[in-house]
Amino acid sequence: MGFDISYHPISEEQMNTWYFELIKNPEKIEALASDHQIDDFYKTKYQDTINAGRETDQNDYFDKTHGFFIAVVQGFFETYFYVRGAALSFSENKQLNSYYKKWEEFIPVGSLTKKVENRLVENYCSGVYIPADQVTCLLDDYHNKADIRSELDQLFSEGRIAVFLKALNFAKERGLGLLEATEVVEPQPFDLNESKSYSNLFNCDQEGPLLYQVTAFEQIKDIEQRNGLPENEVLHNFKIEKVHVEPIDTAIDTKKTTEVAGKRSFWKRLFG
C-alpha cells in the first residue's frame, strides 16, 4: 500500500483564520470564499470540510481529523505539492525532529483532541508541521550540512527531492510553514485526468504528479522488458485498485468529498 503525500504551505495564523475560526463561526465562510475568489464548487467542498471538523469528537485522532482537514482547506487557497511515497514522517532520523513544531505547542487546548501523534499514522492524515522559521533553517541545513542533505536525498529519492525543495522554497518566500499530509490528492498516474482531490486539484503543483507518472510508466516498461512482453502489453491489461486504511471515526464522507462531478478534465486541462 502506498501513500500519496502532499506538502501544504500554511502559517499558524492561516490555520486559525481559514479553519478554527470557521469551526466556531461557519457563517464566515461566505465572506472568506468571496475575498479569496473561491468558486462555488470549492466553496461547497470547503463547507463540507468545515462541517466534518465540527463533528470531530474528543476521542478522535487530531491528525486524522483537524490536522487532515487543515491540509485540505489550505489547498482551496494556495498551491500545494505532491510526492508519491516519501514523507518526513517516515524518517527514523531524530535530527529532523528539531525542525518540527507539535500541534500542542500552538493549537489552543480547546481545539485539540485527546489523541495527537504529530506525524502520519495512516492514510488520510496530517503529518509533521515545519514552522516558518524552521523552513528556512531546514533549507539552509540541506545546503550546508552533509548529514541533513544525505537524509533528505535518501528520503526523497528518484527525483522527489526537487519537489520537496520546491515546496520548502515556496513556503520560505512567503513566510509560511509547511504541513505534511497524505491522500489529500490522489493522482492516477496512467490517466491524470482521473485523479481526485479532497481539495482544489488545480492548486496541486504539476511537477510531483508528472514525476509519479513518468516513474510509473518506466516501471511498467521494465516489467515488460524483463518478461519479454510486447510494448504496452502490461499497461493495456493494467487495473489500479487503490486500497487505503480508512481513518478511525473520521466524520468526513469520502464518497462525497472526493467527488469531482463536472470537473473530470482537471488534469487534462492542466497538462494537455
Image: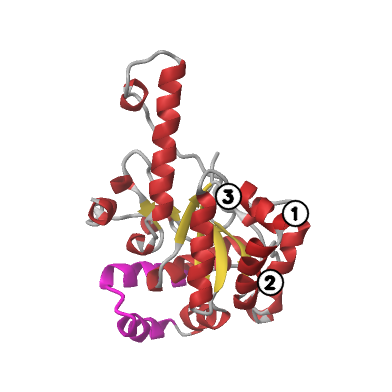
Instruction: Identify whether 214 is placed above or below 111.
Output: above
Q: Is residue 147 left or right of residue 38?
A: right
Instruction: Identify whether 226 is placed above or below 179.
Output: above
Q: Is mark 1 on a helix, strand or loop?
A: loop
In this rendering, which labeled residue sits more in front, label 2 or label 3? 3
> Which of these two is toward me, 211 or 124?
211
Residue type at mark 3 is: Phe
> Which of these two is toward me, 119 or 136?
136
Q: How dense is the environment of label 3, judged by Cα within 10 Å: few (below 14), some, or many (20 and up)?
A: many
In this rendering, which labeled residue sits more in front, label 2 or label 1? 1
Residue under label 1: 93
Q: What element carries label 3?
A: loop
Q: In this view, does 7 lie to the left or right of 188?
A: right
Q: Residue at x 23, y 55 (%)?
A: 269
Of the residues under marks 2 and 3, which one precedes in the sequence?
2
Residues under numbered marks 2 and 1 in contact, where contact means CB atoms less than 8 Å apart = no
Residue 173 at x, y = what percent?
49, 76
Residue under label 2: 101
* Residue at the far top in the pictured view: 228
Q: Which residue is drawn at 65% across and 80% down?
A: 110
Residue 54 in view: no
Say the numbered circle drawn on residue 156: 3
> Which of these two is toward me, 137 or 81?
137
* Residue 117, picture quadrant: bottom right
Q: Is residue 27 magenta?
A: yes
